[in-house]
Amino acid sequence: MASATLSSTLTWVHTPSMKLLVTYGSKLGGTEGLAKMIGDSLRRAGFDVDVLPARQVVSIGGYDGVVVGGALYAGRWHRDAARLVKRHRQRLRTMPVWLFSSGPLDESAATKDIPPVGQVRKLMAQIEANGHQTFGGRLEPDARGFMTSSMAKKLSGDWRDPEHIARWTAQIVDTLAAPRLHPPS
């Protein structure tokens, strides 16, 4: 940990090698792809990052910050992502946390800020999340399942915008890399 004295009462503290978890709930792989893009961006910024499916996360101990993503289905966040937030609620309240949603099958997420759905808003309030972003989704033309395959006939495509993801990830990096003022010990 590097530190430099700014005055007799405050010390600047910056931790350059934070360990971050990017975790996700994904049914068809689009949200998993977003999580990997976010993880790659955070690694390029110098962070140590694990990218894991939410259902595989047993503990968030050892992480300095968490990004949780969930695919949206019929206005609901993927249950694995929601369960992870609920299960680790107390610990998440003590660290920097961002949430993201994946779902709009059009360019709307890249052209305007789409607020989180009600379920995600409630989870954000419970853990005092730093922020949320909605990204465009992806739907393969050969998607399986009755509802999904009928949607794919009209709405297949990939609306995940790498520039949108990079801008949002840069905001996370700026927040995590910002000097924090602490009283001297």
Image (spheres, rainbow, N blue to C red):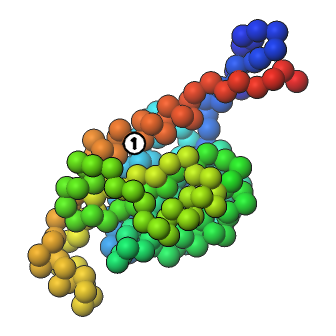
Q: Quadrant of residue 136?
A: bottom left
Q: Quadrant of residue 2?
A: top right
- Could you say which is closer to the camera, residue 113 or residue 12? 113
Q: Residues within 10 Å of mark 1 (few under 14, many from 20)?
A: some
Q: Residue at x 22, y 65 (%)?
A: 105
In the orientation shown, which residue stands out farthest toward the top?
A: 7
Quadrant containing the C terminus in the rendered view: top right
Q: Quadrant of residue 15?
A: top right
Q: Secondary structure at mark 1?
A: helix
Q: In the rendered structure, which amino acid carries the disc numbered 1?
A: Trp
Indicate left or right for 117 with 154 as reference.
right
Look at the image and tell me whether residue 53 can be seen.
no
Look at the image and tell me whether residue 60 can be seen.
yes
Q: Residue at x 27, y 49 (%)?
A: 112
- Could you say which is closer to the camera, residue 45 or residue 90? 90
Residue 87: % across, % down: 66, 70
Quadrant containing the N terminus in the rendered view: top right
In the orientation shown, which residue stands out farthest toward the bottom?
A: 146
Residue 82: % across, % down: 54, 70
Q: Residue at x 58, y 73 (%)?
A: 83
In the orientation shown, which residue stands out farthest toward the left?
A: 154
Q: Decide: is 150 above or below 128.
A: below
Q: Which residue is mark 1?
A: 168
Residue 121: % across, % down: 51, 62
Indicate left or right for 22 with 94 as reference.
left
Q: Residue at x 62, y 24 (%)?
A: 179
Counting labels gives 1
